[in-house]
Image (cartoon, rainbow, N blue to C red):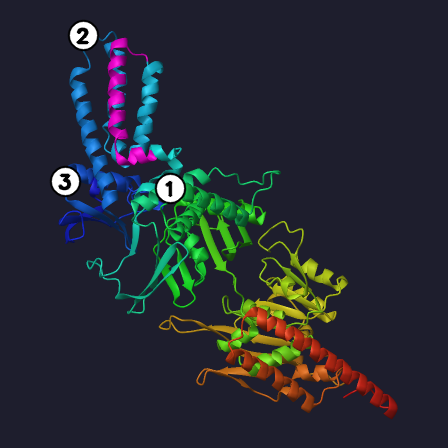
Amino acid sequence: MPNQYRSCKMIIKNQVNARERIQSENKLSLLCKKPEDELCTGNGRTPDLCANPACMSRVVNYFVERDVDGRIGEISIVSPILSRVYTHEQVKMIREISEVVMRIHKEVDDLEKRVFRPKCQNPTLCSKNWAEFIQKIKSDNFLSSDPIKAYIYLLAEKRSWSGGRQVCISCRKTYLNFLEGLRRILVNTTLMSRFLQLKLNYNENDREIIYSYFFRPMIVPRTPQTYSSESIGDFHQAEEYAFGPYKASILVDAGHGENVYSVTSLANGDSMLNGIVAEVTSQIRNVPQVTPKSTRLLSLDELLQIRNQEASKITRQRYPELPQELSSSLAELSCYESIGIGSISAFLIDDNVEEFFIDQPGAPIYLDHRKWGRCKTNVIPAFSELKKVETRLRSESGFRLDRLNPSIKTEISTRRFTVRASLDISPLAADGFHLDIRKLERSHLSLAALVENGTISSEAAAYLYFCILRKINIVAVGEPGSGKTTMINALDLLTPSSWRKITIEDALESIPQREFGKHQVRLRVEPFEERRRLRSKSREIISLLHRTPDLIYLGEIQTASHSKAMFHALSAGLTGLQTCHADSPEQAFVRWVIHHNVPPICLRQIGIIMHMKKLGSRSEHIKKRKVVRICEVKEDLEKDNGINFSSSSVQLVDIFRWDPVSDVINRRIDLFETPALHSIKEYEALTRRIFEEEIGKYKLLFEMLVERKEIDIDCTTRLFSEVSKHQIDMRNERLINLAETTKQAGKPLRP
């Protein structure tokens, strides 16, 4: 095997298909055994014709040496994870390049025999200049690895021979005629003619992007049905669905290995559609990224909207014969490609993708699927695209990203998707780049919807709603992705419309509620990853005392300063909704007391703790999120002064607990005797009958909404706004009646 193939193994497989242009054609499979070999020089050393010049050179040289009869009709480059398949039209362009390589080498050989004649006036200098050119153009990889670069080199050489080179007149004329002949040979290929039509500016750093216009492969996950030489599991297609301009296939491994999420665009494998996308992309890439009347950089949402409109306009004008739906999809693809997010756009707009990860350059993306859990994918972003994503996140956040501050966290909201992105670069990211993008719900879930999907029971939901109307503080704890934010957002939506609510977040995850007629102030502070924080979360929490909120929404409590500020606000009489990462309520207490140095006596201010959990074994691909526990803090006060500063003064009482056997969230104690109810009864005329009637009405209301399928956020929010208004009026009326009764009887105002 020649040296140029020593890190790859070539296999020819015969494939018969009556629908092909030829009755019997061969399939060339390049098994990439050692992508780390020094001959592989692409971005991340990806085995791909677009990204890796070495792969292009090997395939072209194979055609030069072996494809004598022109029978190869398909090329597959196979890596351990996936296969890149190049179709008949792309193979045809490869064959043209190989023919050009053979022809140019022959022309050079012929010229060498006749160029140096007695007419040459300076044989030494002319021979030296010619030898440099010959050495360059006859090198193994010059023409075969990058034909476009070779064409640009010929143009530069032609300009150089025209005036800059010190050669005799006779040789100059011979060389110029020869260079023009080589240029014509190259320009007659399909690849070069399309490149020149698109009027693209060639930059070696953008090689992969440019070649992807012509050689974008069809990605196929590596399965034993495709290549049986190395069994990696027994896959079968479990689901296939379309979204936007993409189609996703879920391949499940019966051996309980990691599932595969395979995504393809509608232009995959179609050279005509790829050409349209490339043409439109090149034209809209020049659309300014700043506002017309200022130097403000457009947000991603604004840029997407402007470029999508321009792409749609160009596509309709240039290709009026295309169906409207296809034209719109191609315009959307062009829009993503022009901004540099083409490789991750499918994951951004697929509502079934909850979170996706890029661990390092050259590594495939993997994700958490709403239905199928953790999946590996068939997408490996180019290094140039990762740099564009990095630049976009830096501009969207407005934060520093450099060696002194190598991490940023920001949220991005567009009409197509809303995400929270965390990015780490060197020196923090040892491999140079790490990206975690978490999808935020664009269609938020109501509390009724959470009852309907089994996250919480109707009785537990009724109890939480009863307590939040009495301004009992609620903290949701649990592992990442367990549904904490979804739950407190659902509770937040059910608060009375008259309440003044203030949110303080570093990444905006609360729901804007102006359309529901609610009073809401949303404050955004720098994340703790930002070293220079002018607006810290802890400072703004303390400042809440002078902003008179009825309810505070603090989002995620992350650091010791956050915790201390939260307990400071709670002890001053403010109540609200928070989330905290912890494996259990007890571990949340350990984190606050031990790690954040919060005095144990402060824990009495917590109120209600909801423990959320993401359930499902490895064999169960569908993960369920549940409220597995609702508990409260029970106070154990000393008799002498009612204050006990020791940790023994705080005990947790389970109010509701999930039973894994019956899959039911059971009530553990009498709800009228919970710690929250004891504090409520001190200031409200509440009897057991009144309490049970009110809780029963809320429980029935949730069950009716579920039964009637009226669980959308708009219906639930507006309905409970009316319920809360009516309930507050009734409670005020009871207080007035109680005040009059107790005044006449001369008794204290206590239930």
In the rendered image, the vertical position of residue 104 relative to residue 478, given as above or below? above
- Label 3–label 1 contact, CB within 8 A: no
Q: Determine which quarter of the picture holds residue 260.
A: bottom left
The Cα–Cα distance between marks 3 and 2, rounded to whole angstroms, is 40 Å
Q: Nearer the viewer, mark 2 or mark 1?
A: 1
Q: Earlier in the sequence, mark 3 or mark 2?
A: 3
Quadrant containing the C terminus in the rendered view: bottom right
In the rendered image, the vertical position of residue 136 relative to residue 51, given as above or below? above
Measured as percent of width and height from the top left, residue 262 is found at 34, 58
* Label 3: element kind: helix
The residue lying toward the viewer, choosing from 675 and 699, is 699
Q: Which residue is mark 1?
A: 278
Q: Which residues are magenta?
A: 166-195
The Cα–Cα distance between marks 3 and 1, rounded to whole angstroms, is 32 Å
Magenta span has 329?
no
* Label 2: element kind: loop
Residue type pointed to by label 1 = Ala
Q: Which residue is mark 2?
A: 118
On residue 165, the disc is none
Residue type pointed to by label 3 = Arg
Quadrant containing the N terminus in the rendered view: top left
Q: Which residue is mark 3?
A: 66
- Label 2–label 1 contact, CB within 8 A: no
Residue type pointed to by label 2 = Pro
* Label 1: element kind: helix
Q: Would you say 747 lies left or right of 228 here? A: right
Q: Would you say 613 lies left or right of 577 here? A: left
